[in-house]
Image: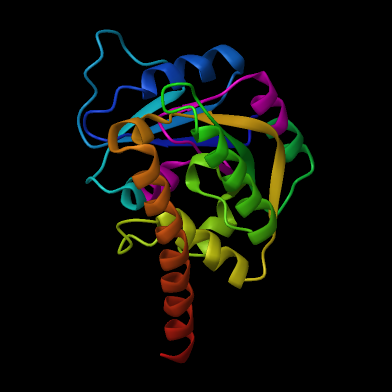
Amino acid sequence: MQQLSIVIPVAPNDEQWRRLLEQLLRLADFPQIIIAACRPYSGQTALPANVQWLIAQQGRALQLNVGAQAAEKNTLWFLHADSEVNLSVVNAVRRFLNVDSEQLGYFTLQFADDGPTLTHLNAICANWRSRYLGLPYGDQGFIQKKAMFEQLGGFDESVKVGEDLDYVVRWKASGYELAELPANLKTSARRYQDTGWLLTTLRHVYLTGYLTLQAKLRIKQSKTG
C-alpha cells in the first residue's frame, strides 16, 4: 500500500466522506488519503497525519485533478465520497498493486440499500456495460499509475457531467486496457430515491450514449486539429 495515494472529491454539503474515511483508516495503513473539498475542514478533531484536506473550486473533474497533483505516490485510487469499502476491496487493491499493472482498474458495482429495490438491476446493467462495452463509471473506483494519468492529461475540466466516461474513452483510445477487479464496491443509491428510479435510470442510459459519443468526437477533433 506504500505506493498508493487515495483521492476523494467531496461536494459542498456532503458528509458521507466521514464514513468512507473511517472505513479506510480501519482497514489498512494507507500512506496518503487526499480529500479534495470545496470548503475548509470543519471537524471537531484533527485529521490523522496521513489524511490531507485540500480546497479546490467546485467541479468533480477539477477536484480530482487537484487531488492527483498533490499525490506523492505512484498509483492513484479515485473514490467517490459515498463509496463503501471492505476487506475484499482492499485485498483486491493489494493484488492489483502487486502485479504492477499498467491497466485502469475498476470494481464491480453494488448499490447500498438507501434507494429503491430496483437499483440492483441498475448494478447488473452497469457491470455488464463495464465488462462488455468497456465503460465503467467513476463510482467503480478507478485505480491507475499516476504517470499514465498525467500522460492522458487527467480529467477534462471542461466536461461538467461525465468526466469519468470521457476519461475512460480517452484511456481506451490511447491503447490502454481496463481491468475489472474481483470485489464489489458499494455506492449510495440515494440519487435514485431523490429523483425517482425510472427517471434516473433513463437519464443515465441517455447520458452514457451521449457523453461517450461526445468524448469520441473530442478525440477526433484533437487529432485533426
60 sits to left or right of 89: left
The quadrant of the picture occupied by the C terminus is bottom left
Find out whether residue 67 is within the magenta segment. yes
Q: Nearer the viewer, residue 57 or 50?
A: 57
Residue 198: x %, y % from top left: 39, 43
Q: Residue 94 is drawn in which quadrant?
A: top right
Q: Is residue 154 visible?
A: no
Find out whether residue 127 is within the magenta segment. no
Residue occupying the point 32% across, 34% down: 10
Q: How is the image coloured?
A: rainbow
Residue 11: x %, y % from top left: 27, 35
The quadrant of the picture occupied by the N terminus is top right
Q: Is residue 225 visible?
A: yes
Residue occupying the point 42% across, 85% down: 221
Residue 139: x %, y % from top left: 49, 40
Residue 223: x %, y % from top left: 49, 86
Q: Residue 88 is drawn in which quadrant?
A: top right
13 sits to left or right of 147: left
**Total count of labels:** 0
Residue occupying the point 69% across, 57% down: 132
> In the picture shown, does residue 172 fall above or below 128?
below
Residue occupying the point 46% across, 59% down: 208
Q: Residue furthest top?
A: 45
Q: Which residues are magenta?
A: 64-92
